[in-house]
Image (spheres, rainbow, N blue to C red):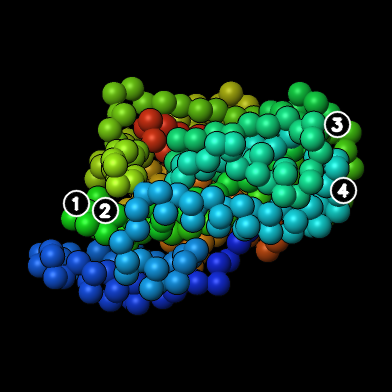
Amino acid sequence: MPSLAAVSKIDFPFKVDQQEVKRRAKDLFITTYPQVERMMSVFDNTEILTRNFCQPLEYYNSLHSFEDQNAEYIRVSLDYSVKAVEECIASAQINKDDITDIIFISTTGLSTPSLDALIINKMRLSQNINRMAIFGLGCGGGVSGFSKASVLAKANPDAVVLLVTVELCSLTFLRNDFSKSNFIGASLFADGVAACIITGDNYENKTQNAISYVGTQSKLYFDSLDVMGWEFLDKGFKVLFSSDIPTIIAKNVNQDITSFLEKHELKLSDIKNFIFHPGGKKVLTAYEEALPVEGDFLKNTREVMNENGNMSSCTVLYVMERFFNRGFENGYGLMVSMGPGFSCEMVLLLMNKK
């Protein structure tokens, strides 16, 4: 079975206290949007303590054109992707020339050539790497990317697949957008870069933690296209998301997970490790109320959200990094994330310490 050889994440040097973000947001909005005062409590209700930002807070005080923001997206994405990949290669104890495939996931900026080409060029990776760049999966991208990397490694036992996820949500912030979605986004979303390496059966996995791919399932919910996504404007990316997201999750997630596990002759009680994307406080509550699991099964997920905010597709790999480096319970693991579409992505894993 394909297995996880390494996972790395980026903690930006500009991580900032949520209460400081709250104060800055109030200062930015108050002169042109007096109603902001009654909305400030949303920052406190997120349960986020610190936010992982790719820029100092002063950057967001100024107006930036979409051209300038996107140029910064490319610069920061490339620099920190290379750093995450280098850490991943060192951790996996592989040679960079061994990488056979690269998957790049992002939904917060645009680049053609895509960032995977820029990474290959800057790092001088093999010129014959198979490339896959995916845009638009949003918060579902981390699990979807992990799934696609595993499927590639299953098809080719000699594969060494590099997955890179980059989301610089803060660079999409629209200073003069006074919509509720933009304000909530300003209280919730953050920036992240993560990488992992998944190897095929013929490649020696040197990690002490055997995390192996078992299966995957995607689901798209009909007639829910407006639940989450972007509206593309001249000034940039305008965030769109519905307050119905926790309700949709609460209504569907139990049955979706149960039916997926049944295909593998498993029950929810067989899952020992829950590697979930933290969409937000209400999303975590929806998971906890819908799934009959004892104990604090979303502890790692919640702590990643508390310490970083919602980093879109990257966040679930930050959760995986905690399991990988801090320990897990032997048995099955389940990765889950929801994203635009509205969609659900799941990956079943077998996790055992060697």
Q: Nearer the viewer, mark 1 or mark 3?
A: 1
The picture places residue 303, in percent across and down from the top left corner, at 50, 64
One can see residue 205 in this view: no
Q: Residues within 10 Å of mark 3 (few under 14, many from 20)?
A: some
Q: Identify the mark nearer the N-term, 4 or 3.
A: 4
* Label 2, residues with CA under 10 Å away: few <14, some 14-19, many ≥20: many
Give SS at disc 1: loop
User: Answer yes or no: do the residues labelled 1 and 2 have beta carbons within 8 Å?
Assistant: yes
Rounded to the nearest angstrom, the CA distance separating label 1 from label 4 is 48 Å
**Disc 1 to disc 3: CB gap under 8 Å:** no
Residue 34 visible? The answer is yes
- According to the picture, the residue beneath numbered tag 1 turns out to be 179
Specify the amino acid type for callout 4.
Asn
The picture quadrant where one finds residue 68 is bottom left
SS of the residue under disc 2 = helix
Q: Amino acid at mark 1?
A: Ser
Report which residue position mark 4 lands on: 95
Q: Identify the residue at image location x=65%, y=40%.
A: 116
What residue is at 37 percent from the left and 49 percent from the top?
66
| Mark 1 residue crowding within 10 angstroms, few (<14) / some (14–19) / many (20+) | few
Q: How far across and how far down the image is residue 185, in percent?
A: 31, 55
Distance from label 2 to label 4 (Cα)?
A: 43 Å
State which quadrant residue 201 falls in.
Answer: top right
Q: Give the CA distance from mark 1 to mark 3.
A: 50 Å
Residue wearing tag 2: 182
Amino acid at the residue labelled 3 = Asp
Q: Earlier in the sequence, mark 2 or mark 3?
A: 3
Residue 171 position within the rendered picture, expressed as x and y whole percent measured from the top left: 41, 56
What numbered label is drawn on residue 158?
3
